[in-house]
């Protein structure tokens, strides 16, 4: 069984693909999984570390880009298709899965033209441009949210949830305290802005420390900053004397979730899938420039259900964030309610559902 998983650009696209790839390895000894992405995306470093083969195509994004970048993207489309066809001819996959991101478009389109069975997974409530187009060609569409069903032909669309890596579900709280050097007696706030960090969240947390002085003996932070912001964020904590651990990036996300009493993060679909699968309380700050403003839609859905708190990026500052942290810390009953609601909407079986769809598509030849 040979499968190609195409997509990337962000961890939100890459990690669901990794979850599916591992499910194939676990359930099929002869499974051969190959990823296709770009050499500039996060997949170029993450996928080799995860132990999978990856091939690259020449492709660039189109949405929310300047005129010159859009022109360059258009001019690269023939090259993207050529690269994709070459990879498909070489590997001869039984099925191709698209997990989102601009580089999935050429690969899935080439597979369609070559008669190879195809399936896409849409992670967000509002589908991105690539999946809206691909939805007209592929054989099967898997979606994370019920609301996404209206964007695709219902006869070939299935509600599965968003795949979550197995290690996320197997995080261990005691191990997390050891790995990150944290105090198990303190309330732990896990801050991250996605695989590359989030400057606005990093700055707001740094400013919030000034308003949290009275809580210093009771709280600690685990903060994933992204490479660019690591030094100055670490200085914030050192200057204010708060306990915790600051890292540019961590591969131990399962343990990081496990130790968290409160999460502060963006609202990407994969992040929300992981938060809800782990049943965690969160403060969500949607990225304001996400395509179709899908992060705001994702976060509002969580907020409406009572599974999370939400601060629009435009209203994010040290005082508003500190006030919300204080409110949550002082409301253990509210934390319990949010955790139960969060866990109730999580879909830890999403990976298995998508695996079964892929196998059905491959066996039937689409």
Image (tube, helix red, strand yellow):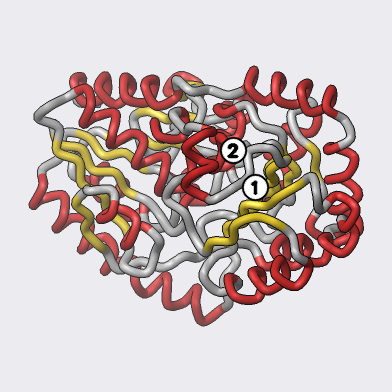
Q: What residue does disc 1 label?
A: 190
In the image, taking residue 244 as reference, residue 7 lies left or right, namely left
Q: Nearer the viewer, residue 241 or 39?
A: 241
Q: Residue 291: in sight, yes or no?
A: no
Q: Residue at x 18, y 44 (%)?
A: 114
Q: Marks 2 and 1, Cα distance to the nearest angstrom?
A: 8 Å
Judge left or right: residue 74 versus residue 294.
Answer: left
The residue under label 2 is 259
Q: Position of residue 102 (x, y in %)?
A: 43, 57
Regarding mark 1 in the picture, which secondary structure is present there?
A: strand
Relative to residue 322, is residue 350 depicted above or below?
Answer: above
- Asked if disc 2 and disc 1 are in contact, CB closer than 8 Å, the reply is yes
Q: Residue at x 81, y 53 (%)?
A: 216
Dot 2 surroundings within 10 Å: few (below 14), some, or many (20 or more)? many
Q: Residue at x 8, y 52 (%)?
A: 90
Q: Position of residue 132 (x, y in %)?
A: 50, 43
Q: Residue at x 56, y 78 (%)?
A: 67
Instruction: Pick the residue in front: 104 or 199.
Output: 199
């Amino acid at each position: 069984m040979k499968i190609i998983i195409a997509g990337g650009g962000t961890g939100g696209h890459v990690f669901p693909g990794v979850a599916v790839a591992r499910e194939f390895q676990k359930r099929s000894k002869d499974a051969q999984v190959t990823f296709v992405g770009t050499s500039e995306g996060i997949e170029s470093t993450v996928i080799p570390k995860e132990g999978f083969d990856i091939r690259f195509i020449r492709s660039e994004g189109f949405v929310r880009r300047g005129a010159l970048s859009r022109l360059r993207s258009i001019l690269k489309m023939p090259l993207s298709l050529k690269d994709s066809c070459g990879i498909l001819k070489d590997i001869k996959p039984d099925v191709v899965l698209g997990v989102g991101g601009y580089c999935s478009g050429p690969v899935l389109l080439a597979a369609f033209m070559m008669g190879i069975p195809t399936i896409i997974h849409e992670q967000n409530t509002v589908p991105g441009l690539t999946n809206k187009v691909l939805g007209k060609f592929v054989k099967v569409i898997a979606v994370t949210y019920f609301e996404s069903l209206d964007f695709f032909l219902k006869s070939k669309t299935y509600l599965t949830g968003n795949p979550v890596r197995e290690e996320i579900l197997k995080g261990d709280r005691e191990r997390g305290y050891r790995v990150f050097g944290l105090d198990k007696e303190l309330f732990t706030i896990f801050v991250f802005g996605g695989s590359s960090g989030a400057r606005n969240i990093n700055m707001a947390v740094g400013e919030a420390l000034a308003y949290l002085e009275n809580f210093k003996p009771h709280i600690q932070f685990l903060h994933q900053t992204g490479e660019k912001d690591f030094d100055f964020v670490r200085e914030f904590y050192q200057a204010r004397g708060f306990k915790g651990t600051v890292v540019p990036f961590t591969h131990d996300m399962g343990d990081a979730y496990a130790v968290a009493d409160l999460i502060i993060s963006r609202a990407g679909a994969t992040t929300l899938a992981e938060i809800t699968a782990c049943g965690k309380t969160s403060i969500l700050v949607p990225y304001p420039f996400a395509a179709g403003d899908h992060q705001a839609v994702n976060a509002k859905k969580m907020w409406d259900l009572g599974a999370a708190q939400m601060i629009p990026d435009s209203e994010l500052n040290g005082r508003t964030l500190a006030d919300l942290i204080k409110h949550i810390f002082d409301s253990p009953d509210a934390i319990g309610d949010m955790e139960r609601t969060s866990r109730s909407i999580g879909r830890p079986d999403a990976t298995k559902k998508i695996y079964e769809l892929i196998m059905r598509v491959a066996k039937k030849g689409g």
